[in-house]
Image: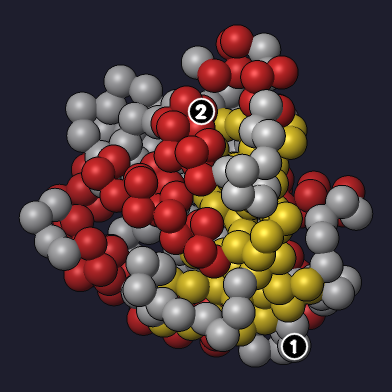
Amino acid sequence: MSSTAVADVNAGRVAVTGALDATNPAIVRMRQLVDGQQYADGWSRCWEQGVTPWDLGEPTPAVVKLVRSGTLPAGSVLVPGCGGGYDAVALSGAGRFAVGLDVCNAAIQRAKQWSSSSPDVAFVNADFFTWAPPEPFHLIFDYTFFCALDPSLRPAWAARMHELLRLDGELITLMYLPQDQDSGPPYNTTVLDYEEVLKPLGFVIASIEDNDVAVEPRKGLEKIARWKKMPDGAEKTASDLLPTDALL
């Protein structure tokens, strides 16, 4: 990520002070806007009214850590539900071209406006479930997208990940794992929820760990998993090596 992009991000930085649950008035308002709407319409209303309590106003610290680790594959990167586009820009460069995808035009216009100096990123206003890119991606990054979808859409989410990722490509899920929610979004989520929809499609967890750079107040509620898309019929036993408590 260029120094100009970093400066632009920091200029738009906002403080993250509220929990992503019903104790936060912004979450209550967000649920009111989304409830009963076609999901595209509901999220668009949130962006248009500035009700975006999930938005950090800067790249997710875990993304910055991943980029600095030097372990990410080169090639094309997809960030579905990209919002303001901070993570897409952070993941671009160093041999990677990133595409930020969002169903909300207001979010995409905001992302395009501040990232105009970043040459290795593009933003697309389209529906994740129907968008048809010219070719599959080497890497997909998901954060607060899975848990924001109605649980009935999770099998479709997994099927799209399978379609959009190249064979032997990598899916990184930064998993926000809220519990005891009366409603959503975000909806109650566990690691097992991811496994139940991804594992039958040939995804294997290569690694999983606590997110030790999570922002307040998400500390202790996030894990980051790196999945590989395996060939059809390949052995899928890596998740069997995980400790039992990683699946709780």
Place residue 178 in its image quadrant.
top left
Quadrant of the rendered structure where residue 140 is?
A: bottom right
Q: Amino acid at mark 1?
A: Pro
- Residue 119's mark? 1
Q: In the displayed structure, would residue 201 be above or below residue 93? A: above
Q: Position of residue 106 (x, y in %)?
A: 37, 79
The vertical placement of 239 against 116, above or below, is above
Which label sits on residue 98?
A: none
Residue at the limit of the structure toward the top, as seen here: 244
Question: Camera-side residue: 124 or 212?
Answer: 124
* Residue at the disc numbered 2: 191
Viewed as shown, does residue 66 lie left or right of 182? right
| Residue in view at x 60 percent, y 68 percent | 78
Q: Which of the image's four quarters has the N terminus? A: bottom right
Of all residues shown, which one is farthest toward the right?
70
Element carrying mark 2:
helix
Q: Nearer the viewer, residue 152 or 209?
A: 152
Q: Amino acid at mark 2?
A: Val
How crowded pointer 2 is (Cα within 10 Å; few <14, some 14-19, many 20+) is rated as many
Name the residue at the front extreme: 233
Instruction: Locate residue 216, reporting x and y percent.
Output: 57, 34
Task: Please tell me how crowded label 1 is: few (under 14), some (14-19), or many (20+) other residues with Cα within 10 Å.
Answer: some
- Mark 1: secondary structure: loop
Q: CA distance from mark 2 to mark 1?
A: 35 Å
Q: Looking at the image, is 165 positioned above or below residue 236?
A: below
**Colour scheme in the image?**
secondary structure
Q: Residue at x 53, y 50 (%)?
A: 143
Q: How many marks?
A: 2
Instruction: Identify the residue shown where x is 35% and y is 73%.
Output: 130
Q: Nearer the viewer, residue 198 or 141?
A: 198
The residue shown at (9%, 55%) is 36
Q: Nearer the viewer, residue 230 or 153?
A: 230
